[in-house]
Image (cartoon, rainbow, N blue to C red):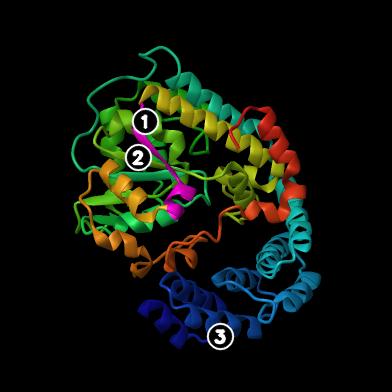
Amino acid sequence: MAPFAEAVAAAPDNLDYRYNLAAASGFTGRVEEARAQYERILAADPGDARAHYALAILSRQTALTNHVPRLEAALARADVPDKALRIRYALVKELEDIGNAAEAFRHLSAANDAQKQALGYDFQQDAAIFDAIEALFGGPPNSFEASGGKAGPAPIFVVGMPRTGTTLVDRILSSHRDVEAAGELQAMPLAVKQLAGTSSRRVIDPETIAASAGIDPAAIGDAYLKRADHHRPGVKARFTDKLPANFLYIGHIAHALPNARIVCLRRNPMDTIWSNYKNLFASQSAYYAYSYDLMDTARYYARFDRLMALWESIWPGRALQLSYEALVADQEGQTRRLLQHCDLDWDEKCLSFHENGTAVATPSAAQVRRPINADSVEKWRAHEAALEPARAWLEAQGVKL
């Protein structure tokens, strides 16, 4: 915090410095400080879309206290697509908070349609990645070079579709006396990409997955741990890596890091689809391009579900598939199950994860600073009619709803 505060003190009119201070305040639970800084930014620049969006997701809005009129005025003035995208997402968050589901969905649909068109995304881009992973690991036993992998520290990978409770589980685990949180690391994707040696600009693509078949898994494990070490204090014996997309790399992880533990969050499919469709991820990230179209999000979920079934068939029980709803309903019982899977002794502090003072830089920052609750269960039903095409399609595909 101190460097950000010093930068603002030295250059109080620099809105980028002030935004960094506001974001850091929010990440560390200083909500009122963050709110004050965002308001200072908007007083100087009423069209600052980053600040509008950050302020909207900082806390839950109410019918009496919200920024909807101001956001509508800012949207009318938005002169570039990226500004309109963020302001619309801010409106979606606030309108949903105050119970105006229809208007929230209208803004969301408009924002996502424009963003999908801007990205030029086609679901076949992701389908090809899933196909390549299934071909590599679901084929003959020797498709992937077998070796003993890399022994040593046992990282805990928290994976799954985004917005399914991965941050919650990461906070539970990092509240344990023997575990520290390393964040959402790119260490495994980058290790595989580097050792595959492919020339493509994307970190993950069919070419890179196919090329990884010839890599010694121990080399992947070594490259991963070297990269991960740069992101952890190293004070505690174990650490978590909470990159949700690592579910794509479970095969590599299982071969390369035999001591690693893997936890995959599973949430009601419709809540998962709704939460992905309505969340503004890094807008240029290829990982989340599917999320700007409702049916693409449903298709992505179906492939995720199919891939997790493949991993379970190859390595039964290797990845603990932990239900978000079960965790909410039975916090202690599911926490004990989680710790046992991760080879951790019981620690009461895991039940008080909301008191964990470390920074949270994900959209769940506000949620995980509260005790466990069921507020997010069955949220999709507020938009049941609009989401019916996705529900019907999943049902037709045989996905368990």
Indicate the position of residue 304 as horizontal and vertical percent values: 53, 34
Label 2 Cα crowd, 10 Å radius (few <14 / some 14-19 / many 20+) = many
* Residue with the mark numbered 1: 252
Earlier-in-chain disc, 2 versus 1 = 1
Under circle 2, the secondary element is: strand
* Residue with the mark numbered 2: 262
In the image shown, does 318 or 115 lie closer to the viewer? Answer: 318
Return the residue found at the far top: 140
In the image shown, does 32 or 373 lie closer to the viewer? Answer: 373
In the image shown, does 291 or 98 lie closer to the viewer? Answer: 98
Where does the C terminus fall, quadrant-wise? top right
Q: Find residue 13 and name its label.
A: 3
Earlier-in-chain disc, 3 versus 2 = 3
- Pointer 1 and pointer 3: residues touching (CB < 8 Å)? no
Tell me: residue 228, above or below residue 80.
above
Q: Is residue 231 magenta?
A: no
Where does the N terminus fall, quadrant-wise? bottom left
**Going 76% across and 49% down the picture, which residue do you hit?**
386
At label 1, the amino acid type is His
Indicate the position of residue 369 as horizontal and vertical percent values: 43, 68
Label 3 Cα crowd, 10 Å radius (few <14 / some 14-19 / many 20+) = few
**Going 64% across and 81% down the picture, which residue do you hit?**
42
Residue 125 visible? The answer is yes
Under circle 1, the secondary element is: helix
CA distance separating discs 2 and 1: 12 Å
Q: Which residues are magenta?
A: 316-329
At label 2, the amino acid type is Ile
